[in-house]
Image (spheres, grey):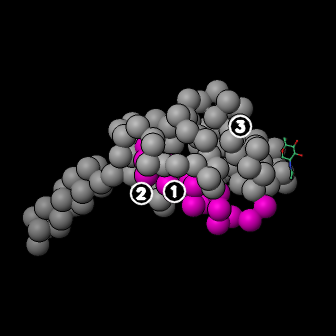
Amino acid sequence: MAGKIACFVVLCMVIAHTEALNCGQVTSYIIPCLGYLRGTAPLGGCCGGVRNLASAAKSTPDRKTACTCLKSAAGAISGINYSKAAGLPSTCGVNIPYKISPSTDCSKVT
Ligand SMILES: *[C@@H]1O[C@H](CO)[C@@H](O)[C@H](O)[C@H]1NC(C)=O
Protein backbone atom coordinates (compact mmCIF):
# COMPACT_ATOMS: atom_id res chain seq x y z
CA MET A 1 0.00 0.00 0.00
CA ALA A 2 2.71 2.46 1.00
CA GLY A 3 4.58 1.50 -2.16
CA LYS A 4 1.60 2.32 -4.32
CA ILE A 5 1.21 5.71 -2.70
CA ALA A 6 4.90 6.46 -3.18
CA CYS A 7 4.61 5.61 -6.89
CA PHE A 8 1.61 7.85 -7.23
CA VAL A 9 3.40 10.77 -5.58
CA VAL A 10 6.40 10.35 -7.89
CA LEU A 11 4.08 10.22 -10.91
CA CYS A 12 2.36 13.41 -9.83
CA MET A 13 5.68 15.17 -9.40
CA VAL A 14 6.75 14.11 -12.88
CA ILE A 15 3.49 15.36 -14.38
CA ALA A 16 3.61 18.64 -12.47
CA HIS A 17 7.19 19.14 -13.57
CA THR A 18 6.67 18.54 -17.27
CA GLU A 19 3.29 20.22 -17.56
CA ALA A 20 3.33 23.37 -19.66
CA LEU A 21 2.37 26.70 -18.20
CA ASN A 22 -1.39 27.10 -17.82
CA CYS A 23 -3.69 30.06 -17.43
CA GLY A 24 -4.32 29.39 -13.75
CA GLN A 25 -0.61 29.80 -13.06
CA VAL A 26 -0.31 32.86 -15.27
CA THR A 27 -3.25 34.50 -13.53
CA SER A 28 -1.89 33.73 -10.10
CA TYR A 29 1.36 35.50 -11.02
CA ILE A 30 -0.41 38.71 -11.97
CA ILE A 31 -3.08 38.77 -9.25
CA PRO A 32 -0.88 41.07 -7.10
CA CYS A 33 -1.04 43.55 -10.00
CA LEU A 34 -4.80 43.89 -10.20
CA GLY A 35 -5.11 46.72 -7.70
CA TYR A 36 -2.34 48.62 -9.44
CA LEU A 37 -3.81 48.04 -12.91
CA ARG A 38 -7.20 49.26 -11.68
CA GLY A 39 -5.64 52.28 -10.02
CA THR A 40 -6.87 51.24 -6.58
CA ALA A 41 -3.60 50.10 -4.98
CA PRO A 42 0.14 50.74 -5.16
CA LEU A 43 2.45 48.51 -7.17
CA GLY A 44 3.08 46.33 -4.10
CA GLY A 45 4.06 42.75 -4.94
CA CYS A 46 3.13 43.19 -8.57
CA CYS A 47 6.64 43.30 -10.05
CA GLY A 48 7.66 40.18 -8.16
CA GLY A 49 4.78 38.36 -9.84
CA VAL A 50 5.65 39.76 -13.26
CA ARG A 51 9.27 38.70 -12.79
CA ASN A 52 8.22 35.18 -11.75
CA LEU A 53 5.93 34.95 -14.74
CA ALA A 54 8.71 36.03 -17.09
CA SER A 55 11.05 33.42 -15.66
CA ALA A 56 8.34 30.72 -15.76
CA ALA A 57 7.64 31.37 -19.44
CA LYS A 58 10.96 30.37 -20.95
CA SER A 59 9.92 28.51 -24.10
CA THR A 60 7.99 29.82 -27.09
CA PRO A 61 4.87 27.71 -26.35
CA ASP A 62 4.91 28.92 -22.74
CA ARG A 63 5.28 32.54 -23.83
CA LYS A 64 2.39 32.10 -26.28
CA THR A 65 0.30 30.60 -23.47
CA ALA A 66 1.21 33.42 -21.11
CA CYS A 67 0.36 35.97 -23.79
CA THR A 68 -3.01 34.36 -24.53
CA CYS A 69 -3.87 34.13 -20.84
CA LEU A 70 -2.86 37.74 -20.13
CA LYS A 71 -4.77 38.92 -23.16
CA SER A 72 -7.96 37.18 -22.11
CA ALA A 73 -7.48 38.28 -18.49
CA ALA A 74 -7.01 41.88 -19.66
CA GLY A 75 -10.27 41.62 -21.56
CA ALA A 76 -12.18 39.77 -18.83
CA ILE A 77 -11.23 41.79 -15.75
CA SER A 78 -13.11 45.05 -15.60
CA GLY A 79 -11.51 48.34 -14.77
CA ILE A 80 -8.01 47.54 -16.01
CA ASN A 81 -6.06 50.56 -17.21
CA TYR A 82 -4.54 49.26 -20.44
CA SER A 83 -1.87 51.90 -20.62
CA LYS A 84 -0.68 50.77 -17.18
CA ALA A 85 -0.91 47.12 -18.29
CA ALA A 86 1.09 47.81 -21.44
CA GLY A 87 3.68 49.70 -19.40
CA LEU A 88 3.98 47.01 -16.75
CA PRO A 89 7.11 45.30 -18.12
CA SER A 90 9.02 48.59 -18.25
CA THR A 91 7.56 49.73 -14.91
CA CYS A 92 8.96 46.55 -13.39
CA GLY A 93 12.11 46.41 -15.50
CA VAL A 94 11.16 42.97 -16.77
CA ASN A 95 11.54 41.96 -20.39
CA ILE A 96 8.17 40.73 -21.68
CA PRO A 97 8.37 40.55 -25.47
CA TYR A 98 4.75 41.50 -26.15
CA LYS A 99 2.22 44.06 -25.04
CA ILE A 100 -0.20 43.10 -22.27
CA SER A 101 -3.38 44.22 -23.96
CA PRO A 102 -6.69 42.76 -25.18
CA SER A 103 -5.59 43.49 -28.75
CA THR A 104 -2.22 41.69 -28.68
CA ASP A 105 -1.67 39.15 -31.45
CA CYS A 106 -0.30 36.25 -29.42
CA SER A 107 0.27 34.09 -32.51
CA LYS A 108 3.24 36.37 -33.30
CA VAL A 109 4.90 35.77 -29.93
CA THR A 110 8.12 33.78 -30.25
C1 LIG B 1 -4.28 55.02 -16.84
O1 LIG B 1 -2.99 55.21 -16.28
C2 LIG B 1 -2.30 56.32 -16.84
C3 LIG B 1 -0.87 56.28 -16.28
O2 LIG B 1 -0.86 56.16 -14.90
C4 LIG B 1 -3.06 57.60 -16.50
O3 LIG B 1 -2.37 58.71 -17.03
C5 LIG B 1 -4.46 57.51 -17.07
O4 LIG B 1 -5.19 58.62 -16.67
C6 LIG B 1 -5.16 56.23 -16.62
N1 LIG B 1 -6.40 56.09 -17.35
C7 LIG B 1 -7.56 55.83 -16.75
C8 LIG B 1 -8.72 55.62 -17.64
O5 LIG B 1 -7.66 55.72 -15.53
* Dot 2: element: loop
Kind of residue at disc 2: Asn
Considering the whole magenta stretch, tell me its main secondary structure: helix
Q: Position of residue 105 (x, y in %)?
A: 52, 49
Q: Mark 3 or 2 closer to N-term?
A: 2
Residue contact at pointers 2 and 1, CB within 8 angstroms? yes
Residue position for label 1: 69
Residue 87 is marked as 3
Residue 10 in the image: state x and y as whole percent.
19, 56
Q: Residue at x 56, y 53 (%)?
A: 70
Residue 22's tag is 2
Split into 4 quadrants, where in the image is the N terminus? bottom left
Contact, mark 3 vs mark 2 (Cβ under 8 Å): no
Is 74 covered by the magenta stretch? yes
Where residue 19 appears, as percent x and y from the top left, is: 30, 54
Task: Single out the residue that lies furthest toward the bottom.
Answer: 1
